Amino acid sequence: MAGKNKLCLSVITADVGGFIGNVSSHPEVLDTAKETLDTAKGKAGLRDFHVLRCGDDLALVITHEAGCESRALHEIAWKTFISCRDVAIGLKLYGTGHGLSKDGFTGTLLGMGPGVAEMEFVERESESIVIFLINKAATGPFNLPFYKIFADPFNTAGLILDKEMSDGFSFRIRDLESGKEIRLSAPGKLHEILALAGSGARYVITGVAKNSNGENAASVSAQKIATGGGEASHSEPTAIVRCQAGFPTVGEVMEAFAFPHLVSGWLRGAHNGPLLPVPFYEANPTRFDGPPRIISAGFQIADGRLLGPHDMFDDPSFDETRRLSNQITEYIRRHGPFEPHRLPEDALTTSNLPATIEALKNQFQ
């Protein structure tokens, strides 16, 4: 081990305003995030940081020693997002009120709009981390790939070839309706895991740990949409995965995204579409505000320092995945306002559709 003290890695995302609709983040917003975090170094045990963006979603990658759900660290992130939102308002960017609650900081970012994925661990001799950021997808987009990474030997050969993974992994799954969580271990409870994870609109994998010693392997943000001041605030999911030396290799983690599975979200969060893995510079969803994008940033962590990022999807081996995703996009877009492209009625509570149907109710005979 590189050290005995636990290090916390936090990936915190928020939509503070889109550059050209929902397509991208303005450089001045990104610069503001960097400058604000730079002045906070040393506070709340903040060791290092990096600023990323996927589409119009801003992401703060932070290493620190304050622990998970630290009030001090969350407040630093909140103030950073507020500074960025102020810049976005001055630039008249789109949707500056969408991503943050109007209530002000309450002591935690949970339920305030930003997405929070955090993980605490003792840094290994070689600590390889892969971070995933998604834009234009709603709940549960990591359920299928995380099942593949941590429970499917067809994807992760190490589950049968690496003795350090032979005991398998346990999944923490949250019921978004009740807010309660359950831990289920694979391979013993594999069918039960699939029964829940297959319903990604309600049950979301929020964390993975090794069965052998309980060591954290992955963390996923799974915050509900928050409301404040009469407006909804939300963030799209993000994830952290530890790789190598008793965990799935980097290659096994990335392999799970070679299939562009269908996720909910896309335009107005009201449509299903393929999850398109792209390099950083292509994370600019323009076709029908999509299709949903995912980027991946690889880091080595050395004594709390973030070495990177490496653009993990900037690789021609994903060209066929992108080609298939575009074919799926072409096919499903032809459905227009019809299911299964458009989400079912009960999943469109933030749209005008329920009001339209309610207005027609008395005309049915």
Image (cartoon, rainbow, N blue to C red):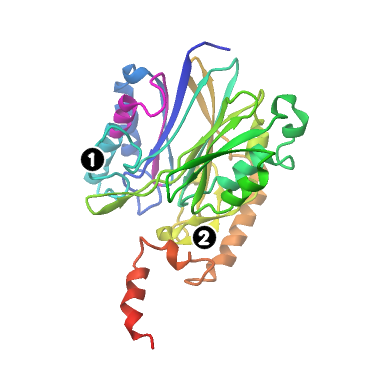
Q: Amino acid at mark 1?
A: Asp
Does 284 sit above or below residue 220? below
CA distance separating discs 1 and 2: 32 Å
In the rendering, at what x and y percent does residue 324 appear?
64, 56
Q: Which residues are magenta?
A: 56-78
Mark 1 secondary-structure assignment: helix
Residue in the foreground of this view, choosing between 103 and 14: 103
Q: What's the residue at 53%, 71% (across, down)?
A: 335
The quarter of the picture where residue 218 lies is: top right
Q: Is residue 170 left or right of residue 96?
A: right
Mark 1, Cα crowd under 10 Å, few <14 / some 14-19 / many 20+, is: some
Label 1 or label 2, whichever lies nearer to me, is 2
In the rendering, at what x and y percent does residue 160 appear?
77, 33
Quarter of the figure with the N terminus: top right
Q: Which residue is mark 2?
A: 272
In the rendering, at what x and y percent does residue 294 appear?
52, 45
The quarter of the picture where residue 183 lies is: top right
Q: Is residue 171 left or right of residue 47?
A: right
Q: Which residue is mark 1?
A: 86
Mark 2 secondary-structure assignment: strand
